[in-house]
C-alpha cells in the first residue's frame, strides 16, 4: 500500500540525511526507493527530481561505472518508459 509506505520512506530518508549524510550510499539507496514509490504512485513531479539527484550524486561520489550509479541510469530509463506508457512495469531481476 503506497499510502502506508510513503511516509516511512520519507521518514527514513530525512533521518539518514541528518545522521549519515545525503551522499552516504545507504541514504542514496533510500532516496532511490522513495523515488520508486513516487513513480508507482505516478507522482512524477516528485519522482523525477529524486531519481535525477540520486544519479547525479552517485556519479559524483561513486563514479559513473559503479553498479549503484548504473542502477540509477536504469531507474531513470524505467521512469521515462513508465511516464510514456502510464503503466508500471518492473524490469528488475533477482
Image: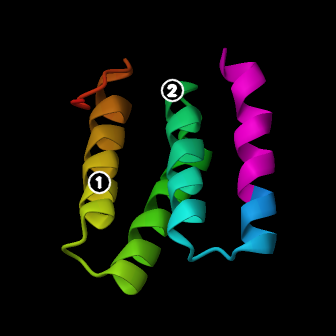
Residue 12 is tagged as none
Structural crowding at the residue carrying mark 1, measured as other residues with C-alpha within 10 Å and reported as few (<14), some (14–19) or many (≥20): some
23 sits to left or right of 61: right
In this view, the residue in front, 31 or 85, is 31
Residue 66 magenta-highlighted: no
| Stretch of the chain drawn in magenta | 1-13
Residue 81 on image: x %, y % = 27, 35
Residue 40 is tagged as 2
Structural crowding at the residue carrying mark 2, measured as other residues with C-alpha within 10 Å and reported as few (<14), some (14–19) or many (≥20): some
23 lies above or below 92? below
Q: Does dot 1 land on a helix, a strand or a loop?
A: helix
Q: Main secondary structure of the magenta part?
A: helix
Residue 33 on image: x %, y % = 53, 44
Give residue 83's quadrant in the image: top left
Q: Earlier in the sequence, mark 2 or mark 1?
A: 2
Give residue 71's quadrant in the image: bottom left
Check disc 1 and report the residue beneath it: 71
Residue 3 magenta-highlighted: yes
67 lies above or below 8? below
Amino acid at each position: 500500500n503506497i499510502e502506508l509506505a510513503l511516509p516511512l520512506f520519507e521518514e527514513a530518508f530525512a533521518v539518514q540525511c541528518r545522521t549519515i549524510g545525503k551522499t552516504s550510499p545507504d541514504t542514496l539507496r533510500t532516496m532511490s526507493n522513495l523515488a520508486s514509490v513516487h513513480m508507482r504512485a505516478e507522482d512524477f513531479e516528485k519522482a523525477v527530481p529524486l531519481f535525477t539527484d540520486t544519479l547525479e550524486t552517485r556519479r559524483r561520489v561513486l563514479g559513473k561505472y559503479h553498479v549503484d550509479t548504473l542502477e540509477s541510469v536504469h531507474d531513470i530509463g524505467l521512469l521515462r518508459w513508465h511516464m510514456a506508457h502510464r503503466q508500471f512495469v518492473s524490469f528488475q531481476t533477482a
